[in-house]
Image: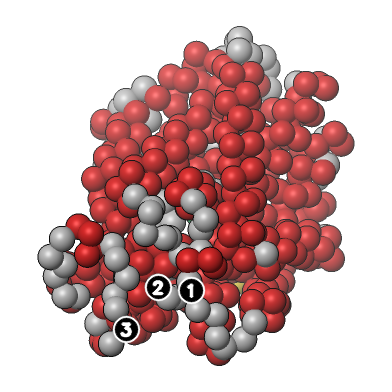
Amino acid sequence: MEKVKKRNGFASGIGFILAAAGSAVGLGNLWSFPYKTSANGGAAFVLLYVLSVFVIGSVVMIAEIYLGKRAQANPVTAYKKASKNLGWLGLFAIIIPLFIICYYSVLGGYTVKFTLNSFNNNSEILGSFTGNIPEVILYTAIFLILALVVVMGGVKNGIEKVSKVLMPALFIILVGIAVYCLCLGEGVKEGLNYYLNPDFSALGFEGVLAAMSQAFFSLSLGMGIIVSYGSYAGKEIKVGKSVCMICIFDTLVALLAGLAIFPAIYHYQAIGGSALSDRGILLLFESLPLVFDNLGTAGHIVSFLFFGMVVIAALTSVISLLEVVTQFVIQKFGVRRKKAILCVSAICFAISVPVGISLGYALNAPSGTTPPLQICGQNLLDFFDMVTNVVLMPICALGSCIALGWLIDKPQSKAQLFSPKPAA
Ligand code: PFF
């Protein structure tokens, strides 16, 4: 059985911070944050989002790190150690990652395809690519194999090493793209106005809920990830400082993504392009490719960098989810890491195939017709996304707070708070 001793955990504080930030920075930042902001009152939404991150999200993150550090084990064991009655909550923290990996890998596969196709006009391939089932399956597999290889390397030699390189790279690329988009000229001002002008009347109750759930999703809370990473964090890791840095980094990336995307879209419209959708999957895989293709050679380079950056963000997020399930399998069944990750990836791949097919049908269905392979009127990706985001994750995050606040023995000091619970 793999004991989670320090040698198997993060080697340094910065490694822990970058790995957790790698998990936090994902499609949530580069894609859903910008469009949710524009749909919910611009700066008013941003303000509420930032408040939710720092006032609520940071506290839940501390609770989750604490649960993991105290138990030095996977989320199921960690919740059980908090209270005998909370084992079921730990199971949620295993099921949620499984659900998310299955649809995230399909989107991850799309981003790999769009990166590699950047010099061949991405704006023309959405329909043909998503409807080509063998190709979608191939790219989903490529994405999952990339993630699998990292997790196979372990926490210190795989996840930590990769995060230390990819996170700074992602940030540099994003700053470069944002500067480029802000210098496009025509339309930039309108784009910034649309993205950031506060309109409190557009921020209804739904906007408030959207800001809060976006903060939770973006910080990777309620998915078992932070509990799992917390269990690998050594004594020397300063929890308060780490949480602060993760929250700042995550928010900065989200804000920068909007600064790149909206000026680019408005520039395209200002120079005579068609009105573009800034919502859902179409923003990433239809609207932005149109903008990039229209910018000539520079646009193709920006497209390559942009989608490459999205691959990095998606990859560092999905490895954190794979690690949660892998850690559970290793500790529960006493198998080796290699075997555990191969089994977990195979199961996820098997489920992601129907998800990819269902999304392909949905994107290519003629309007007015109902595509096959749907649950409750939604394609499998939207259904999995809804079940995890709306139902399972809030329960799991709330459970972490209840466990920390009421169910575990009260620590007497800060030092005791973050030191592992001695074996019973
Ligand atoms: N914080 C991630 C994001 O914003 O995309 C949430 C996440 C999604 C983490 C998918 C891990 C993952 F595989």
Q: Quadrant of the N terminus?
A: bottom right
State the residue position of label 1.
Answer: 4
Tell me the residue at 72%/28% (across/down). Answer: 302
Q: Are marks 1 and 3 in contact (CB under 8 Å)?
A: no
Is 401 on the left-hand or right-hand side of 74? left
State the residue position of label 2.
Answer: 72
Residue found at the far bottom of this picture? 333
**The disc labelled 2 sits on which kind of residue?**
Gln
Q: Quadrant of the C terminus?
A: bottom left
Percent position of residue 118, x then y = 80, 37
Is 67 on the left-hand or right-hand side of 169? left
Marks 2 and 1, how far apart in space?
6 Å
Label 1 packing within 10 angstroms: few (<14), some (14-19), many (20+): some
Tell me which label, 3 or 2, sits earlier in the chain.
2
Tell me which label, 1 or 3, sits earlier in the chain.
1
Percent position of residue 140, x then y = 74, 62
Tell me the residue at 34%/50% (across/down). Answer: 238
Marks 1 and 3, how far apart in space?
13 Å
* Badge 2 residue CB within 8 Å of ligand 1: no
Marks 3 and 2, how far apart in space?
10 Å
State the residue position of label 3.
Answer: 423
**The disc labelled 1 sits on which kind of residue?**
Val
Depth check, front residue: 340 or 194: 340
